[in-house]
Amino acid sequence: MATTAHERGRVDFIQALRGVAALAVVGFHARGALDPIHGLGDRLFAMGFAGVDLFFVISGFIMVEATATRRPDGAAFLIKRLARVWPVYVIATIVHVAVRFGLVTYLARPANLRALGKAFVFYPQAPHGAPFLGFAPDDVGWTLNYEFAFYVIFAISLAFNRARYLVLSGLFVILLIIVPLVLGHGALRLDPYGDYHLRPAELELTASPMMWEFLAGVGVALIYRSRFRIASRALRRAFVGVAVIATIAQYLTHFRCGYGITYMGATLVVLVLALALAHKEEPLRVPRWLLWLGNISFSLYLFHRVAQHLIFRLCWGTRLQPQLDRPSYFIVSTALALGFAQLSYVVLERGLSERVRAAALRLCGR
C-alpha cells in the first residue's frame, strides 16, 4: 500500500500558509502607503489582519503534528515552545520600544514597566476590550497571549497520553462553554468582540471565542492523520479550488470583516482542511521562496513593525517625509522587514532560542 504524504512527514503547505499569513499582516500595517494607487492598500490588505486567524488555525495543526509520533511529555513540550517564542519576543519588543519611543523615555514611566512585565509573561494588558484585551508594547504581542494560553492547555492534555485529545476537548468545553455560562452571566458567543467581564484577565482570555480557532486547527490535523481520505483526485482538486476561491473572494470583498471563527476564521479552517486532505494523498509543491517566507514568518511577524517605525522616524521631518504616504514606503519598509526577519531567524530563532531550549531541557532533566 502506498504511503501518504503525512506518513512521510512533510507539511510544506503549512510553512507556505505561515508565510502568506505573515505577509498579509505586514501589508495590513503598511496598507495606507498604497492607497494613492486607486485605493490599492485597502483593496489588497484591509483584511490582512486575518493572517492572525490563519496563524491560530495553523498553530493547532502544528501542535498535533509535533507531538503525534513521540511519547507525550507536557513539561518538555511547554519548555520547547517557550524557548522557541519567548527570547525572540522579548528582544523584538525591546527593539520595537527603543525604535518607536526611545528606550530610556519609555522605561521612565512605571505604567510602561508594568506593560512590559505583563507582555513578557504573556498576560493580557487589560481584562476588557476583547479580543485584544489591551495592546502589548510591540503592537502584535496580544496574539501571543492567546498562543501561549493554548500551549499551556495543550501541554496539560499531553499528560493524559492516549486520552489527550478527549481531555483537550473537555478543557475547551469548560473554558469556552461552561465558564461563560456560569461566570459570564449566562452569556455564550462565538463572536470574539465582547467581554464576559471575567476576572482575572487570563480567564477572560482563555474563555475568548478566539480560542476556537486553535481547536479547529487540532481537528483538521486529526482528520489529516486519520484514515479519512478523498481518493478522487478530481474531487480533491475541486475541494481545494472551492476553498481557495472562497478565501480570496471573502478577503477581497471584505465580507464578514473581523477576527474569529464567525468571520474569516471559518473560511480559513476550510482552506487548511482542503489543502491538508489534498497534501495527504500527494505532496503539494511549494516554491522555495514561499518555504523561506514560512521559515522566517515568526520573526517577520514580530519585527515588521520595527522596520515600519524605523523608516517612519528616519523620514519624519525630512524631505523624504512625503514618501511615507506613498508606495515607496510600502516597498522599502517591507524589504527592510524581510531583512530583519532573516537576521532574526538566523541569530535568534536558530541560534539563541535553540541554545535556550537545550539548556532548559538539561536543567529540567529532559
Image: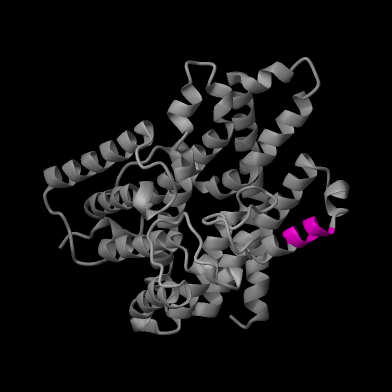
- What stretch of residues is rendered in magenta? 110-116
Is residue 58 part of the magenta span, yes or no? no
Location of residue 16 by image quarter: top left
Is residue 113 part of the magenta span, yes or no? yes
Q: Residue furthest front?
A: 185
Q: Main secondary structure of the magenta part?
A: helix
What residue is drawn where x is 18% and y is 63%?
228
Q: Position of residue 202 (x, y in %)?
A: 58, 70
Q: Is residue 236 visible?
A: yes
Residue closer to the observer: 322 or 366 = 322
What residue is drawn where x is 27% and y is 39%?
246
Which corner quadrant holds the C terminus? bottom right
What residue is drawn where x is 69% and y is 40%?
306
- The correct choice, above or below, for 224 with respect to 339 in the image is below
- The correct choice, above or below, for 287 with respect to 5 in the image is above
Q: Position of residue 10 (x, y in %)?
A: 36, 55
Which corner quadrant holds the N terminus? bottom left
